[in-house]
Image: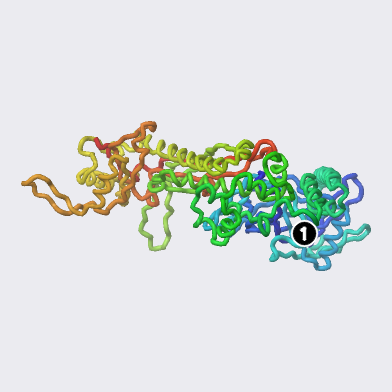
Amino acid sequence: MSKHPDRFIMCGDVEFDAVDRIEAAADGGESVKLKGFKMLAYSGGSMDVGWGVPVVVDLAGMAAPKKSRPILLQHDPLRIVGHTESVEIKALADRTELRVSGVISGASDSARSVVESSANGFPWQASIGASAKRVEFVDKGEKAEANGRTFKGPVYIVRASALSEVSFVALGADDNTSASVAACAALNAGESPAEPKEGKNMAEKNEVTAANGAADVAATVSEIRAAAAAESARIASVRKAAGGNAEIEARSIAEGWTSEKTELEALRASRPVMGAPAAHIKGDETPSEAVLTAALCKAGGMRVEKRFDAATLEAADKRFKRGIGLQELLLEAAWANGYSGRTFRGHEREVLRAGFSGFALPGILSNVANKFVLEGFNAVESSWRSIAAIRSVNDFKQISSYRLNGGFEYDEVAPNGELTHGEAGESTYTNQAKTYGKMFAVTRQDIINDDLGALTALPQRIGRGAALKLNKVFWGAFLDNSAFFTAGNGSLKTGAGTALGIDSLTQAEQAFLDQTDPDGQPLGIAPSILLVPTALNARAAALMNSTELRDTTASTKFPTVNPHAGKFTSVYSAYLSNATLTGNSSTAWYLLADPMTLATIEVAFLNGVETPTVETADADFNLLGIQMRGFHDFGVSKQEYRGGVKMAGA
């Protein structure tokens, strides 16, 4: 992920074990007593991690390695505290949490400081360090599910992540978290922790074999040494980039800057304070991410009134009266990061490098692309929603649902009050989510040409492509129904008398109502949807809206009441008669049950995400531009044929 900083932290609670752990020394010498701890590392809620809006980590998508993870102090790889022995993602009734336990195995001042300050009552907090692999943006007014909770936008949900380390921190992102400590003993050399209240049996229970203990510690130490080596290399590079500026050097080391950002800050600091005016004075301050996003959306032709608040739109109009292009966006980001040039042309490499060196530019671009993807997606016919059941799935494995058969009819309760068990039949429906997607890019050429359409029109076409694919898969499955709607099942009628009209509609309704369940009992469900191709749309509307019937002959007697007026909801789709799909027809029509009651077809979406997702992919922004990918996870499958009747219409 390059949409946001690829590493983030979340905070939780800490608790020390009341019993010391006994570990055999790696060299076979005298055993070492280690202090155990437990952490509520993350409670599953939203946090502020510096991304502009709250962030939620979906624990269902977090990769939590089974091997030990380092335990650090303040996320500093040089300040080793210990290692984990257990990483558990625990689902509770109202939320999902990340819990961690382990031992304070570090032989350092940091480890001693944690234990001794805890003994004095200091309220340590826990904080996880993780990398984001896939991020979903939930817009304002929209909702999304994660960790057994519902979150309202705007919010980022990290759908895929990897746990890298856990730290003791003095102050976390959540001021409401706290830590409780029990029977903490110092780890100074020569001191013996007090006998645990639980007694000798509990101490024996917590013993670990020398082989396992030494292996875990060795693996953890190896990882920490590698991290320390990488950090040492970073410090050396930023010292060189600071060019002798002691203040910039100190900040770059303390705040984890890259050498590129350090170099930019050093250049910015070297500009004279007095003399010529600054290279750019565009406004009072750098525009916010929301203001830039609104300006880009408006410049792309989107109706922005319902997508942004009045203050954001006013700020965007005031700052960018003539609209905004790609080059101006990149310059705004570069200026915010210390770039001092006046123009884009001739300085493309420097602007790109500066623009992506700290400012939230990738997130802005992905956010804008996501909005235009949804514009294109929602512009395509979505009649499938009217006739399909929709469900959420957690993974890509095949899922099953029981059919109607099975003994669920109530039995008379005996005098002793004992109820009999209902048994589900073995016949099932199946469905399975799959991934569909496309990659697209705003190239370096697009940026040099200042082609805003590459960021607006292209994603809109990608969104349209996602909707077309969903329709093609859905209607392809629905129309391939020669073995689904059959005369033998009582769900297919053919012949001239099936052309859409009052009599054929009556015939279809009766066929539906006469259906029985697998046990031979009346189905007991009434149809509610009249599905027709576009050629029959006007006739279906007339049948549903007309209250009278008239005959043009002079001598024919007829009733003046339409028995079907307003009885069914008329739905049409151009796909029913599309020549590219098997089973298409311009005369066939269907009478269907409400899909919430009995569905003939079902659409399953991964994690309940019904619209396509756009995210930034790894790319060399300095040379190749901005590369993105759009994907959509869904599956379609026919379900219960008794939920509908097909009329051939010819």
| Direction from residue 328 to residue 69 in the image, left or right | right
Q: Split into 4 quadrants, where in the image is the N terminus? A: top right
Viewer-proximal residue among 433 and 523: 433
- Residue 189 is situated, as x and y percent measured from the top left of the image, at 93, 57
Quarter of the view holding residue 204? bottom right
The secondary structure type at the circle numbered 1 is strand
| Direction from residue 458 to residue 529 in the image, left or right | left
Q: Which residue is mark 1?
A: 169
Residue at image point 23% right, 39% down? 499
Residue at image point 82% right, 63% down? 184
Quarter of the view holding residue 49? bottom right
Query: Which residue is the extreme one toward the left?
Result: 555
| Direction from residue 100 to residue 556 in the image, left or right | left
Q: Split into 4 quadrants, where in the image is the C terminus? A: top left
Residue 22 in view here:
no
Amino acid type assigned to the residue bearing label 1 in the image: Val
Give the colour scheme shown. Answer: rainbow
Query: Which residue is the extreme one toward the bottom?
Result: 121
Figure check: 315 above or below 505: below
Residue 414 in view here:
yes
Figure check: 185 above or below 64: below
Crowd tier of the residue under label 1, counting other residues whose Cα lies within 10 Å: few below 14, some 14–19, many 20 or above: many
Number of residue marks = 1
Query: Which residue is the extreme one toward the front?
Result: 276
- Residue 348 is situated, as x and y percent measured from the top left of the image, at 69, 40
Figure check: 457 above or below 204: above
Residue at image point 26% right, 51% down? 544
- Residue 64 is situated, as x and y percent measured from the top left of the image, at 69, 47
- Residue 455 is situated, as x and y percent measured from the top left of the image, at 57, 43
Viewer-proximal residue among 313 and 587: 313
